């Protein structure tokens, strides 16, 4: 479906494969979030497909670290020409209750990974309860990571940061050099945010971008099930991925692009097929930009 010509035309674009797009038959908040595939096999499959970035997960990285250690992980990453690593997913980082204790443990781990392996970014989530965002509190608590790592706050339609205005208010008030927003086409679409709204974000606050695809009308009523099981490869759904990319580029973004495919039918494929399908379908979206 996607020709080698598409790959050549978009040769200046670098892609990062997000954790759950190449972790096998696991999904967010499932019985386990640890990949059944060895770390080395996943990194090699990503590199063979053409990816320059690779996604990590806090639970999985502990499992891999305890098996082979950071030194071997770093060797595998470098041997395969992977330039960008990201890690997900920090939640409850702004809370003032018992949930903050567990969040701080995860944050400590992520900063450890940043020091040992180097990270492009740490993905952090908004709040998932009914209370509206406390912008001053979230801005104060957003924090910053050392080691050249960005902290990226993701806008999500079922959260307390469901609009660009709220997300931008938080990161603008925090005003940290390595703090900003993660813009995902799926969340924009399901949140009914026009792609043109991206131009409201100053370029220094767009720290990460993710692409995927979906049907315009959700195939299931539950938005959580929709997001973890029914995303599509770019070009195989009904979203206008190139239009989204044009707005992102018009806003001044020129970094690596994440590819977040959360799909029940995708995650049961073999490693090479998963990686190749995500790379080709994603890269094809840049062909005519």
Image (cartoon, rainbow, N blue to C red):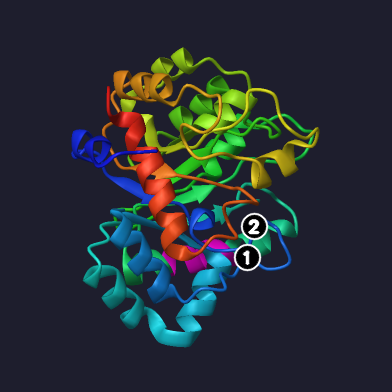
Whole-percent x, y for residue 7 in the image: 25, 40
For label 1, the SS is loop
State whether the magenta stretch is mostly helix, strand or loop. Answer: helix
Q: Which residues are magenta?
A: 105-112
User: Is residue 6 left or right of 113 when viewed as pictured?
Assistant: left
170 in magenta = no
Q: Earlier in the sequence, mark 2 or mark 1?
A: 2
Q: CA distance from mark 2 to mark 1?
A: 6 Å
Whole-percent x, y for residue 145 in the image: 39, 54
Q: Residue at x 39, y 16 (%)?
A: 199
Q: Quadrant of the C terminus?
A: top left
Whole-percent x, y for residue 277 in the image: 43, 49
The front one of 102 and 61 is: 61
State the residue position of label 2.
27
User: Is residue 13 left or right of 272 when viewed as pictured?
Assistant: left
For label 2, the SS is loop
Q: Quadrant of residue 33?
A: bottom right
Whole-percent x, y for residue 86 in the image: 41, 55
Say whether residue 288 is visible.
yes
Q: Residue at x 34, y 34 (%)?
A: 284
State the residue position of label 1.
33
Q: Check if mark 2's residue and mark 1's residue have beta carbons within 8 Å.
A: yes
Position of residue 54 relative to residue 214, above or below, is below
Q: Residue at x 36, y 44 (%)?
A: 280
User: Is residue 207 left or right of 59 when viewed as pictured?
Assistant: left
The front one of 272 and 35 is: 272
Which of the numbered marks, if any, corresponds to residue 280? none
Q: Quadrant of residue 230?
A: top right
Q: Quadrant of the N terminus?
A: top left
Q: Residue at x 46, y 64 (%)?
A: 271
User: Is residue 3 left or right of 185 when viewed as pictured?
Assistant: left
């Amino acid at each position: 479906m996607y020709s080698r010509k598409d790959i050549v035309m978009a040769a200046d674009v670098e892609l990062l494969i997000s954790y759950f797009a190449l972790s096998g038959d696991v999904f967010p908040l499932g019985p386990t979030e640890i990949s059944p595939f060895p770390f080395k096999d996943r990194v090699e499959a990503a590199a063979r497909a053409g990816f320059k970035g690779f996604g990590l997960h806090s639970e999985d990285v502990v499992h891999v670290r305890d098996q082979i250690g950071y030194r071997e992980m770093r060797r595998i990453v470098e041997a395969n020409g992977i330039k960008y690593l990201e890690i997900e997913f920090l939640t409850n980082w702004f809370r003032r209750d018992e949930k903050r204790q567990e969040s701080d443990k995860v944050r400590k781990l992520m900063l450890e990974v940043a020091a040992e392996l180097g990270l492009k970014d740490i993905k952090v989530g908004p709040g998932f309860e009914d209370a509206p965002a406390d912008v001053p509190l979230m801005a104060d608590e957003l924090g910053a990571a050392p080691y050249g790592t960005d902290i990226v706050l993701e806008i999500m339609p079922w959260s307390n940061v469901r609009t660009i205005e709220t997300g931008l208010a938080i990161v603008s008030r925090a005003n940290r050099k390595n703090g900003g927003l993660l813009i995902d086409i799926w969340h924009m679409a399901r949140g009914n945010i026009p792609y043109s709204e991206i131009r409201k974000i100053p370029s220094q606050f767009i720290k990460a971008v993710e692409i995927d695809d979906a049907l315009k009308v959700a195939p299931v009523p539950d938005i959580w099930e929709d997001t973890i099981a029914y995303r599509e490869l770019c070009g195989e759904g009904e979203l206008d991925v190139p239009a989204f990319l044009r707005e992102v580029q018009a806003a001044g973004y020129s970094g690596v692009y994440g590819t977040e495919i959360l799909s029940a039918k995708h995650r049961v494929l073999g490693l090479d097929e998963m990686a190749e399908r995500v790379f080709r379908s994603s890269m094809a979206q840049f062909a005519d930009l």
